[in-house]
Amino acid sequence: MSVRTVIVGTDGAASSSATVEWAAREAGRRGASLRIVHILEWNDEESRESAGNSYVERVWAASDSLTATAARRAREVAPEIAIRSDTLIGHPAARILELARDAELIVLGSRGRGGFAGLRLGSVSLRVATHAPCPVAVVRGTPVAGAPVFAGIHGSPATDHVLETAFEAAVARAAALVVVRAFAPAKQPWAPPDQDDVERDRIEEQLAPWRQKFPDVPVEIRLAHETVAATLENASAEGQLMIVGSHSRGVVRGALLGSTGLHLLQHAACPVLITRPLNADPGSPQIR
């Protein structure tokens, strides 16, 4: 039986401590172990050639100190979980994507070390969030304690998986769940005048099996006629976690640009969980 593992990347940036703490608490909620990784961007040949170099030794020592500090902080917030910390060599995004093959969840910060204020999402977090074969959480903003979990749905085949993840997250946090559906009202003359009621009934039908499975979770349905991205960004200011889904559409260059998920990863006011079935196709997913 494989060990369930949450993997969190740390780079020593000011936001890394909050990212590690969030990951530790999430591992505790899931009954999973936590692996903390810091990746030195060298290739194997460079590392062999530099062996014994005093500068390299200092870098390794600093990295070990960084991961040890992160592990101590993780133990403080989640003393019940097993924690491992490692320094690895390679390109950060590529190495994390390798680790993601056996992970239950990858957790990353929203900015790279020394990132400019205008660069709201680090390149490593972006690449991992869009290509990992497992769910990815990007920790940003300040989660509102005791606030609801939000789930953005759009009527695709991924909706059931989003709802399952959202109900489980709400149960783990003893929180309410707000299900958000944004859509433009139909303008055709034959469109039903009570379109909101029709949409609400459709969502209630989707929610029915999950309400039955999780009867103690309070659920609110929220409909909006703004863009999906704007609706979910605004909602994120009220929540402790925003959950959206993803699915693959094959190799489509630039397909991620302008997507709802990408917008949230850059602008949300709380952590964002991009959920997908474990071992999903890591090809070129489109985050919705």
Image (cartoon, grey):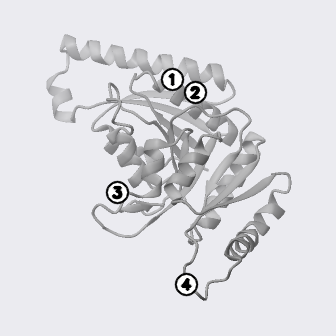
Q: Earlier in the sequence, mark 3 or mark 1?
A: 1
Residue type at the position of mark 3:
Leu
Q: Which circle marks residue 17 in the picture?
A: 1
- Image coords of residue 184 (percent x, y): 55, 69
Q: CA distance from mark 2 to mark 4?
A: 50 Å
Label 3 to label 1, Cα distance in Å?
29 Å
Q: Residue at x 85, y 51 (%)?
A: 216
What's the distance in space between the residues labelled 2 and 3, CA to CA?
A: 30 Å
Image height of 42 relative to 165, above or below? above
Assess whether mark 1 and mark 3 are in contact (beta carbons under 8 angstroms). no
149 or 133: which is nearer to us?
Answer: 149
- Label 1 to label 2, Cα distance in Å? 6 Å
Residue 257's disc is 3
Q: Where is residue 29 shown, x and y percent of the image?
A: 69, 39
Residue under label 4, please give it.
188
Q: What residue is shown with label 2? A: 21
Q: Secondary structure at mark 3?
A: loop
Task: Write down the quadrant of residue 47 in the picture.
Answer: top left
The image quadrant that residue 163 belongs to is bottom right
Q: CA distance from mark 3 to mark 4?
A: 29 Å
Of label 1 and label 4, which has the lower sequence position?
1
* Residue 109 as seen in the image, left or right of residue 156: left
Q: Residue at x 39, y 47 (%)?
A: 128
